[in-house]
Amino acid sequence: MENHYDVIILGGGLAGLTLSLQLKQEKPDIKVLVLEKREDAAPEAAFKVGESSVELGTHYMREVLNLKDYLDADQLPKHGLRFFLSPKHKDEIHRRVELGPKQFLPVPSHQIDRGIFENDLVEMSRKLGNDVLLDAKVENVEINEEAHQVTYSKNGESTTVNTRWAIDATGRASFMKRKLNFAESIEHNINSAWFRLDYKIDIDTWSDDSTWHSYVKDGLRHFSTVHLMDKGYWVWIIPLVGDRTSVGIVADETIHPFKEYNTLEKSLAWISKNEPQFGGILDPLHDKIMDFKLMKHFAHASQETFSTDRWTTVGEAGLFADPFYSPGTDFISIANTLTADLIQRDLKGEDVFYRTKFHAQVFRALFDNWMPIYVNQYPLWGSTQIMVTKIIWDWAAYWGVNCLLFINNGLTNLDLMKEAVSGPTALMNKYGEISLQMQRLFKDWEPYDKADITDRYIDPFDLGFMKTLQEDIVEKQIDTEELKQKLAKNMELLEHVAAEIFRLVSNVAHGTAMDIKVDPYTMSLNKDRTVESVNSKYLGRNEYVAKELKNMWMYDLPVDANV
């Protein structure tokens, strides 16, 4: 054991351990100490949210941390996110509109057993030369100009060690938030209950309908993160290694009060009432249930994330949004990468004062742009065409900007990011503005989306631009100039997608013609709302985008829909 470290990481969960790998792989002589309070190895099929990864976080684990071979050998592959809508047909899975990929995605992802993964990460970190202490409870952190002091207890004895950087990865315990009082609440009242079963739940066995089985090769649905959806909630079904399954309820408090499912018995009754087919599947399996956990008010923020006093917060110790699109590992990846960038530069003697403040602003901006996807949107979860359209839009924006930036090291490219955020007409500000406009559109659309749509399968990759956006983030790097060009091109695509979606929706809501010009930055279904924007621009129809969006549109197309 050392008395002085370059970095001490408070917390040895997913965020802290992956950061320890990243730091050591980038700088083999760096001295890192990880302090984890759990006494011994985490149990297999560990009882944590975060089993499902998506593109950005998967890239971080596979490519940045060089865990590709390990993940392929020791964790389950994931067949994308899969959504079952048409809530009037909850007794017949094959009648529900299903949105999900037919084939494995170009970008691989994984269903991760957090217990196995975190135990293996401990050994990987130690093998690289990091000190990882279990049963080590952090008692105090003193922030000083030259060296911080971290005091922890282990085996009844207190030890104080010095460090240049202190990283809070203590999860929801949020040690630094509590110590320095910078917690921040989010107005997104979503709660959850979940449990694991020592049993393989395979959704492919829920129906004998041959047409439904023809959509996806038997066995592939099982590897998806399944979402069963209706107004105000979704239920997840996630496969785990060892033929185990994670099941969770995530619901809006104003529609489905927490008290209705805050015990295991109530949760099972709630599922039987709200998802009767799944409830019937679970009825004979109650003796297979391994455990049960609750979490109130998922989302939280932080007034501080990256401090010029040489400490940062990563993982759930900092910001957490909502589990709907499985973004937990994404936020870990981004925070860890920005943190590692600051530490490595500082240890080389670079003044990182400005870079620290800039990283903090960019990270918060990404979070603030992410939250409108969820806030006040849970009432839409039971609207079939809205949700198909919303998911397509949310994925297109995520792949076309967030993933593209991260995978090509854009977030740590200060010159690129300054250009991307400087002024209201800069790319990231336009991105945030148009994203907010689209979430407003989905909300305004709700009174008009009343059709009982059934017996449809929507593959996002039947839309050509979706396939291209995904292929552009397949484990390949492009230089800064090409990245700028591709981001600008994707932003232009998103503008046309937004405008064409508005035409389709406005035609249903107000009977407007399909050839109207649309300003994606000021468009509104609400005729009483006036929106102004310095990015205002009226767009005519884009033939390619209009043609591709027909593949996800389930209402009858108007006679003037052809371009």
Image (spheres, rainbow, N blue to C red):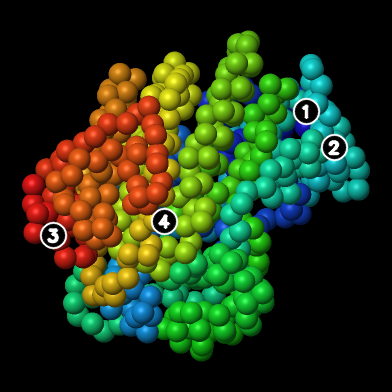
Disc 2 residue type? Asn
Q: Earlier in the sequence, mark 3 or mark 1?
A: 1
As measured in the structure, the alpha-carbon distance from the residue carrying label 3 to the one carrying label 4 is 22 Å
Disc 4 residue type? Lys
Residue corresponding to mark 1: 2
Q: Earlier in the sequence, mark 4 or mark 1?
A: 1
In this view of the protein, which residue sits in the foreground, 443 or 83? 443
Indicate the position of residue 499 as horizontal and vertical percent values.
25, 43
Indicate the position of residue 187 as horizontal and vertical percent values.
61, 51
In this view of the protein, which residue sits in the foreground, 88 or 132? 88
Q: Residue at x 68, y 26 (%)?
A: 307
Q: Is residue 181 left or right of residue 380?
A: right
Disc 3 residue type? Pro
User: Dot 4, how many residues are within 10 Å of its Cα: few (below 14), some (14-19), or many (20+)?
Assistant: some
* Numbered tag placed on residue 558 in the rendering: 3
Q: Is residue 17 visible?
A: no
Q: Residue at x 40, y 41 (%)?
A: 530
Q: Nearer the viewer, mark 3 or mark 1?
A: 3
Residue corresponding to mark 4: 443
Q: Secondary structure at mark 3?
A: loop
Q: Secondary structure at mark 1?
A: loop
Q: Residue at x 62, y 75 (%)?
A: 261
As measured in the structure, the alpha-carbon distance from the residue carrying label 4 to the one carrying label 1 is 56 Å
Q: Nearer the viewer, mark 1 or mark 2?
A: 2
Q: Earlier in the sequence, mark 1 or mark 2?
A: 1
Q: Is residue 535 left or right of residue 127?
A: left
In this view of the protein, which residue sits in the foreground, 175 or 229? 229
Q: Earlier in the sequence, mark 3 or mark 4?
A: 4
